[in-house]
Amino acid sequence: MTTTTFSRRALLRAFAATAVTAAPMMANATGFLRGAGDVRRITMYNGRAGESIDMIYWIEGDYIAPALEEISFFMRDWRNNQVHTIDPRTIDIMTAAHRLLETSEPYMLLSGYRSPETNAMLRSRSSGVARNSLHMQGEAADLRVNSRSVNQIFNAARACNAGGVGRYSRSNFVHMDCGPVRSWGG
């Protein structure tokens, strides 16, 4: 008898690959992810950490806890490796906006969770960093997609009508969060 040991990540990838090909799509899903079907998937790249993620995190109405843990680890504060749970609502907003962009190119994650120390350091360098940033609660992400303009990403995220969306044209990224619906930036 042969015993094979799989890492948690390998099992999640195998599960994700199977789920994508086997899951039926619903044509009449409701909410801001309408048309998303029975599967929600997020793809991102983090250039600072040199990591990529392509993760199914929701199937047929249920979040997949180990997948959310992997996403939280991926979106950790890369400056000090602190991990905080990322709010699934933020991931849903990111996923919905990405679908509206109609691209298979992953997001480039610039900032997910920020520790209070990192946020204070960034705040000392820039007036654009909020004292009580939702990044510190695991409720925000700063993203870009190289094949889409800041305006395209901003408009896709705003179309979701679910959370805050900030346009940072000079820095070439869009902020998305699961806080109150609002938008800002130029």
Image: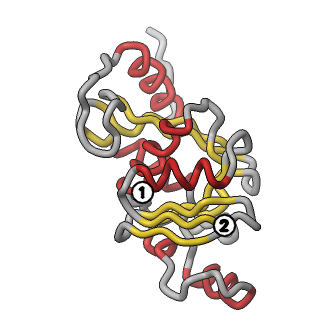
Residue 92 position, x and y percent, is: 39, 48
Residue at 60% across / 60% down in the picture? 174
69 on left or right of 27 = right
Q: Quadrant of residue 103?
A: top right
Q: Identify which residue is drawn at 37% across, 69% down.
A: 179
Residue at 27% x, 23% y: name it.
26
Within-10-Å neighbours for mark 1: few <14, some 14–19, many 20+: many
Q: Nearer the viewer, residue 87 or 176?
A: 176
Q: How many marks?
A: 2
Upstream in sequence: badge 2 or badge 1: 1
Observer-side mark, 2 or 1, equals 2
Report crowding for label 2: few under 14, some 14 to 19, many 20 or more residues within 10 A (C-alpha): some
Picture disc at residue 168? 2
Q: Nearer the viewer, residue 56 or 40?
A: 40
Above or below, 144 relative to 21? below
- What whole-number distance in Å separates the C-alpha atoms at marks 2 and 1? 18 Å
Determine which quarter of the picture holds residue 169: bottom right
Residue 50 as seen in the image, left or right of residue 98: right
Q: Is residue 88 left or right of residue 184?
A: left
Q: Secondary structure at mark 1?
A: helix
What label does residue 37 carry, if any?
A: none
Between residue 77 and residue 149, name the one nearer to us. 149
Relative to 82, is 145 above or below?
Answer: above
Q: Is residue 144 left or right of residue 82?
A: right
Label 2 is placed on what type of residue? Tyr
Q: Which residue is mark 1?
A: 90
The residue lying furthest to the top in this view is: 1
Badge 2 marks a residue whose secondary structure is: strand
Give the residue type at disc 1.
Thr
Q: Residue at x 59, y 50 (%)?
A: 153
